Amino acid sequence: MTSATTPTPSPQVHGMFDPATWTVTYVVHNGPGSEAAIIDSVLDYNPKSGRTQHTSADRVIDYVRTNKLKVQWILETHAHADHLSAAPYLRDRLSAQIGIGGHITAVQKVFKGVFNLEPGFKPDGSQFDHLFHEGETIPLGALTGEVMFVPGHTPACAAYRFGDAVFVGDTLFMPDVGTARCDFPGGDARALYASTRKLLNLPPEMRLFMCHDYPPNDRPVAFETTVAEQRAKNIHVHDGVTEDEFVAMRTRRDATLEMPTLILPSVQVNIRAGELPPKEDNGVAYLKIPLNAL
């Protein structure tokens, strides 16, 4: 616990925006040569050809090596529906562990059925190196992280707090964009409202880092805000918005949204901690496209 006389650590945060998926990958650390964590990495995927590349992940590796960082953790805020994770590629090259919130097992159980995955796929989280529980601490050299469960967008969403920096995943977007959708399997608008209040009850000066930005009105891409700014300006959950008002808004809005472009390839890879499906007897891995299922 930080005392009134001990300032909250303010780690260095380097965000890398991927314009193809509107995703931000973060490296959080305490300066050159320190321990580091990578949050929400991106595997480049071409839906037209089915080819994967590692351009985005290699940018992360270049930053890590330039700053002589020692990556301890590759963290996922949830099983993303809009991009594929590059976690295994980064783990193999940086000797780190892949971690995610422990409720990923609920998501795996649902989507094992949706995709009719092979019998050998175990919905027990064993594909990840570590499953976090609520309030668990994450050692990172001079920094210590804290895991905050923030369900609603999915049952398994987690935020990660390092000092005065909180990585909120899809729970919140920038104030002029609002909040995440709740209509995926296991989503819950009331749970999301509670999760947003959990984050917005943090000290007002806390820095909040978004996993995505979808800028309206041609404003520049942005992905850092504060608790105070969110409480004052978030179009969906600013102070004064009640739970019932939020649920009604979210339900109406979600009914108008199309599925994300990459939801079908993303989810079946990301519930495997970013690993591709097992290769078949011809040496090729295949993704499944369930028809009329979502």
Image: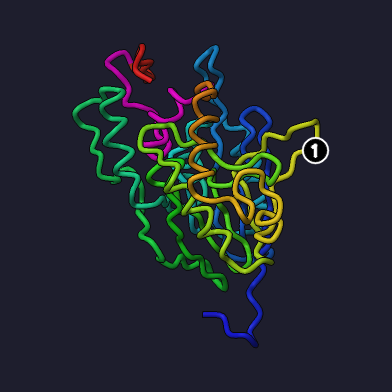
Q: Amino acid at mark 1?
A: Pro
Residues packed near mark 1 inside 10 Å, few (<14), some (14 to 19) or many (20 plus): few
Chief SS of the magenta region: loop
Q: Assess whether residue 9 is covered by the magenta stretch.
A: no
Tell me which segment is drawn in magenta.
261-282
135 or 270: nearer the viewer: 135
10 or 41: nearer the viewer: 10
* Looking at the image, residue 213 lies above or below residue 292: below
The x, y position of residue 187, in whole percent, is 40, 38
Q: Assess whether residue 268 is covered by the magenta stretch.
A: yes
The residue lying at 48 percent from left, 33 percent from top is: 251
Q: From the viewer's perspective, is 226 left or right of 134?
A: right
> Which of the 4 image quarters holds residue 25?
top right
- Is residue 66 something one can see in this rendering? no
The residue lying at 37 percent from left, 57 percent from top is: 132
Q: Secondary structure at mark 1?
A: loop
Reading the image, the residue beneath label 1 is: 220
* Looking at the image, residue 55 lies above or below residue 12: above
